[in-house]
């Protein structure tokens, strides 16, 4: 399972087995889309660091892949909100 990240500075795109153009690039303020590969967690991508909702956020539900709307290339933190199985 992934851990929430209050500040994506220093994080890079590094999905194992991926050879996409974004591989190795910084994540903070550089993501246009997101995929949620979990079964029981919604992922919240925040515009600001420290899960601050003042300037917006996007929610990605389990199994969903989508383009980010409110945090398109302006994503600074990510949280996971899970329901126990």
Image (cartoon, grey):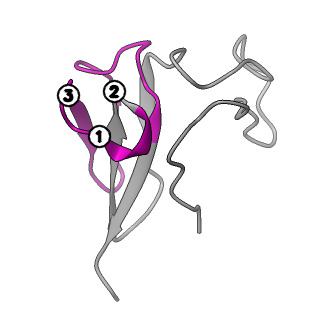
**Magenta stretch: includes residue 75:** yes
**Magenta stretch: includes residue 76:** yes
In front: label 3 or label 1: 1
The local crowd at label 2, few if under 14, some if 14 to 19, many if 20 or more residues have their Cα within 10 Å, is many
Q: Which residue is mark 1?
A: 52
Mark 2 to mark 1: distance in Å?
7 Å
Q: Which residue is mark 2?
A: 47
Residue 85 sits in which quadrant?
A: bottom left
- At a point 48% along the width and 54% down the height, the residue shown is 37
| Magenta segment | 49-77
Disc 2 + disc 1, Cβ < 8 Å: yes
- At a point 21% along the width and 24% down the height, the residue shown is 55
Q: Can you give x and y, in whole percent of width and height, for residue 52 in the image?
A: 29, 40
In front: label 2 or label 1: 1
Mark 3 to mark 1: distance in Å?
8 Å
Disc 3 + disc 2, Cβ < 8 Å: yes
User: Which element carries disc 1, helix, strand or loop?
Assistant: loop
The local crowd at label 3, few if under 14, some if 14 to 19, many if 20 or more residues have their Cα within 10 Å, is some
- At a point 32% along the width and 21% down the height, the residue shown is 71
User: Which element carries disc 2, helix, strand or loop?
Assistant: loop
Q: Earlier in the sequence, mark 2 or mark 1?
A: 2
Q: Can you give x and y, in whole percent of width and height, for residue 58 in the image?
A: 25, 34
Q: Give the label on residue 56, or none.
A: 3
Report the predominant secondary structure element of the magenta stretch: loop
The local crowd at label 1, few if under 14, some if 14 to 19, many if 20 or more residues have their Cα within 10 Å, is some
Q: Is residue 34 left or right of residue 53?
A: right
Q: Can you give x and y, in whole percent of width and height, for residue 72 in the image?
A: 36, 14
Residue 38 sits in which quadrant?
A: bottom left
Q: Quadrant of the N terminus?
A: bottom right
């Amino acid at each position: 399972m992934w851990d929430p990240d209050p500040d994506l500075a220093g994080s890079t795109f590094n999905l194992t087995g991926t050879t996409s153009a974004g591989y190795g690039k910084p994540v903070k303020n550089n993501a246009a889309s997101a995929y949620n590969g979990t079964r029981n967690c919604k992922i919240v991508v925040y515009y600001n660091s420290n899960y601050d909702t003042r300037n917006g956020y996007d929610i990605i539900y389990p199994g969903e892949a989508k383009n980010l709307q409110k945090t398109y290339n302006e994503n600074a933190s990510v949280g996971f909100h899970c329901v126990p199985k």
